[in-house]
């Protein structure tokens, strides 16, 4: 497992790629702390940069899962998304 970082509004947030074996795809996830900064249900995207960044991220996961094994993150995605 390797984590990367993205910078948004001057702050760094963790991202990582996770393999979903059941679907034979690799997806990018980011920490949940970033989710609310990119999109607001009433106002939409906070900026064009936010929209572009959001398009790269498949799913936001709880911050504590960012350092968990791929299997744990994949299980979270299966439960929340599928």
Image: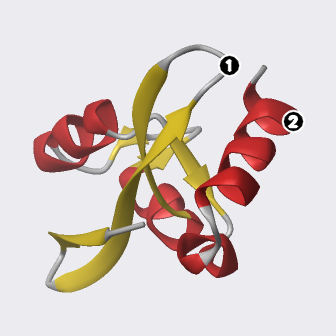
Q: Nearer the viewer, residue 67 or 9?
A: 67
Left or right, 58 with respect to 15, comes to: right
Work out how far the residue at label 1 is from the one at label 2, CA to CA, in angstroms. 13 Å
Quadrant hosting residue 25:
top left
Q: Is residue 29 above or below residue 56?
A: below
For the point 59% across and 38% down, the residue is 41
**Residue 34, horizontal then vertical, whole percent:** 44, 66
Left or right, 28 with respect to 42, comes to: left
Extreme residue in the right direction: 79
Q: Secondary structure at mark 2?
A: helix
**Residue 64, horizontal then vertical, whole percent:** 67, 81
Quadrant hosting residue 27:
top left
Q: Please give the residue where the numbered disc 1 appears in the rendered image.
A: 22
Quadrant hosting residue 82:
top right
**Residue 17, horizontal then vertical, whole percent:** 38, 49
For the point 56% across and 52% down, the residue is 60
Q: Secondary structure at mark 1?
A: loop
Q: Please give the residue where the numbered disc 2 appears in the rendered image.
A: 79
For the point 36% across and 73% down, the residue is 14
Left or right, 62 with respect to 5, comes to: right
Q: Work out which quarter of the rendered image holds the N terminus and state it.
A: bottom left
**Residue 18, horizontal then vertical, whole percent:** 48, 46
Q: Nearer the viewer, residue 14 or 26?
A: 26
Tell me the crowding category of disc 1: few under 14, some 14 to 19, or many 20 or more residues within 10 angstroms, Cα based. Answer: few
For the point 74% across and 28% down, the residue is 81
Q: Is residue 74 above or below residue 35?
A: above
């Amino acid at each position: 497992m390797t984590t990367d970082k993205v910078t948004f509004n001057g702050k760094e947030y963790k991202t990582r790629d996770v393999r979903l074996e059941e679907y034979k795809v690799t997806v990018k996830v980011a920490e949940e702390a970033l989710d609310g900064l990119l999109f607001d249900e009433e106002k939409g995207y906070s900026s064009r940069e936010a929209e572009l960044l959001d398009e790269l991220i498949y799913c936001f996961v709880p911050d504590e899962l960012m350092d968990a094994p791929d299997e744990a993150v994949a299980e979270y995605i299966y439960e929340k998304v599928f």
